Image: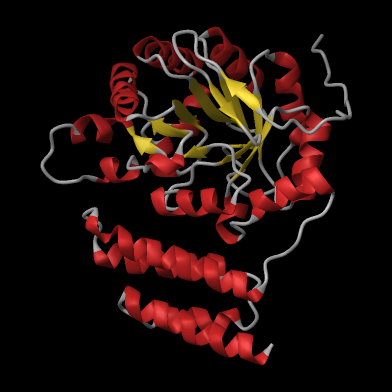
Amino acid sequence: MEKRFRFVKYPVVPSSYTISSPFGPSITVSPAAVLAPMAGVTDTVFRRLIRQQGGCGLLMTEFTSSHGIVKSVGARRVQKAKRYLYFQPGEHPIVAQLFGSDPPVMAEAARICEDQGFDGIDINFGCPVNKVVKCNGGSGLLRDLPLVDEILRSVRAAIKIPLTCKFRGGWNHQELVYREMGKIAEGNGLGAVAMHARTREQGYSGTADWTWIGELKQHVRIPVIGNGDIKTPEDAERMFRETGCDAVMIGRTAASNPWIFRQMADYFSTGTYRQPTEDERYQIMRTYFQMLLDQQDYEVNVGDIVGKMKQFATYFTHGVRNGSHLRVAIYSEKTGEAILERVRQFFERELAAA
């Protein structure tokens, strides 16, 4: 008879946790809060922006193709895989997240990332996007646990730095495999696991089932990072207390509220936190957009930078008074400099009218 999860209210919000490696140095993550890897979001500029705000203990790259990394070695042009893996010294500790389904290629890609100076490697078993799943990557591998085991064994043998993985609860509610995934990870010497408490079938709809995180925590001895539906510091505290997880991972919330990690740190230490002022909202947009422009020297297409500015205008204007007017103005521009000027003019008017 299957053992049912017993609800426990844990009394402590952990301040840190450690990701160990059987072959080399460990990573101490403090605070116990992680920026989730997000395609199209967690590039070096956004990661550094999050680091500047404080409260985030570990950064992760966008998920990157293992085949792309291996192919990029020796290439003349700076390819996408290399741009995804570019980071600066101030981003440590930082983990490279990889996806793929070929164990030898995954192992070689992990070796390349280790040589590049990453503090750890994470394997993606959670991405629900069709084009990734169709190639047997991401959450598609949740239906092939023997291959998961082979991938983790191959990568673990190839590197000395800590290895972790992120996965979903299962393919659907009839095929939940999070306990098995936890045991496979632990058995292959991984230093921690992260779980998004939804299924692949759910995508980002519905609600995350945090009881799965609590069950996983009781099922393994390595650290468990909880992910899914953390929108406020109160949510983070509730996840810690209800599941006993060792850390929380924040994804989509951080894109629209880059202050979330600082707010969590304040809340855990003082019981209170504050919302950003209009001036702080202006400063975050100005800073991020300027950082993007400064990144142009790394063979980044100008059109890509303008596109990124327009993408983040959607995120950063969330909660801004008359933010829809600013979005319309930004979408109409064709250069980064013109977008920056639109932002300056908008907030100058809004702050004067406040």
Quarter of the view holding residue 90: top left
**Colour scheme of this structure image?**
secondary structure
Quarter of the view holding residue 111: top left
Q: 181 or 354: which is nearer to us?
A: 354
Residue 331 seen: no
From the viewer's perspective, is residue 72 above or below residue 1? below
In percent of width and height, residue 75 lies at: 13, 38
Residue 217 seen: yes
In percent of width and height, residue 150 lies at: 42, 12
Quarter of the picture holding the N terminus: top right
In percent of width and height, residue 18 lies at: 60, 22
Which residue is at 83% across, 30% downward?
12
| Residue 135 in the figure: left or right of residue 247 | left
Which residue is at 45% across, 26% downward?
120
| Residue 82 in the figure: left or right of residue 230 | left
In percent of width and height, residue 276 lies at: 67, 66
Which residue is at 59% across, 61% downward?
256
| Residue 97 in the figure: left or right of residue 273 | left
| Residue 66 in the figure: left or right of residue 195 | left
Which residue is at 64% across, 16% downward?
222
From the viewer's perspective, is residue 222 above or below residue 316? above
